[in-house]
Image (tube, grey):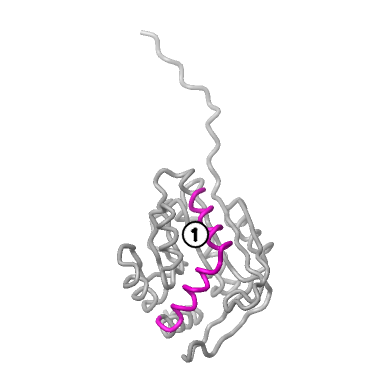
Amino acid sequence: MSEPEYLTNTRNGYDAIAESSAEMFRSEFDGAPLDRAMLAGFAETVRRDHPDPRAVDVGSGHGVVTSFLAAQGLAVSGIDLSAGMVEYASRTYPDLDFAVGEMGRLPVPDAGVAAVVAWYSLIHVPAAERPAVVAEFRRVLRPGGYLLLAFQVGTDTRHLDEAFGRDIALDFHRLDPDDVASLLEVCGFEVFARLVRLPEPGSATAPVPQAFLIGRTPVPAPSTEPPPATARS
């Protein structure tokens, strides 16, 4: 059975621009203090609650965010649909693990990680497919695990046929934070935090508002059952 068209287009598009787009995305991240603060606070929260802070960066791209999270103390690996992106990230950050994979079918066991980060990767998933993807994030998270989503705010879809001198066919779905929060709750998350950053003049990657949502999986309530009676000898 052939894969959905959006997966093929996303893979081919990022394969095409893996090398040529690297410098722009790296420099934009270096100039985004609130983005870095959100990621640093997220990582510290995960480490506070999970002694074994395993994490997966879904849609890891050039590996910039994966590397930043590793520097914040998370045991993080990257997964990306694009083999070109994985090759670039592996070459640039040889001490980190990157693998080709699909966010809707993560190569992670049930409750296998303390954190999932989807930093501008859910934006390529059509609305009809998003619940299944978010449910997959939920599957791989431990109780009390954290999910961080970053995305452009809006209700429209931006389509690009060309970028960095290469022909592509990429859709960028802008999302409404309230809709995303509702989706998290439907998929079994508690909304833990949210931030909306206004557009930044002169930024190639932030021409519209940007949103950051953190969800958390529930922690089972402590048992209220009385301890069993000790047998008398």
Can you say which quadrant of the picture contains the N terminus?
bottom left
As drawn, is 131 to the left or to the right of 94? Answer: right
- Local secondary structure at mark 1: helix
Residue 192 locus on image (x, y percent): 61, 51
Quarter of image, res 81 = bottom left
Left or right relative to 208: residue 40: left
Which residue type carries mark 1? Phe
Give the percent coordinates (x, y) of residue 56.
42, 60
Query: Could you say which quadrant of the image residue 178 lies in?
Result: bottom right
* Magenta portion: prevailing SS class: helix
Q: How many marks?
A: 1
Nearest to the observer: residue 65 or residue 137: 65
27 falls in the magenta region = yes
Towards the viewer: 229 or 29: 29
Q: Residue at x 33, y 70 (%)?
A: 90
Residue 176, picture quadrant:
bottom right
The C terminus lies in quadrant: top left
Residue 32 counted in the magenta span: yes
- In the image, 230 versus 178, the foreground residue is 178
Q: Percent from the top left, x then y, of residue 21?
A: 46, 81
The residue located at (49%, 78%) in the rendering is 24
| Residue bounds of the magenta highlight | 19-45
Residue topped by disc 1: 137
The percent coordinates of residue 155 (x first, y second) are: 68, 74
Q: Residues within 10 Å of mark 1 (few under 14, many from 20)?
A: many
The residue that appears at 51% across and 55% down in the rendered structure is 40
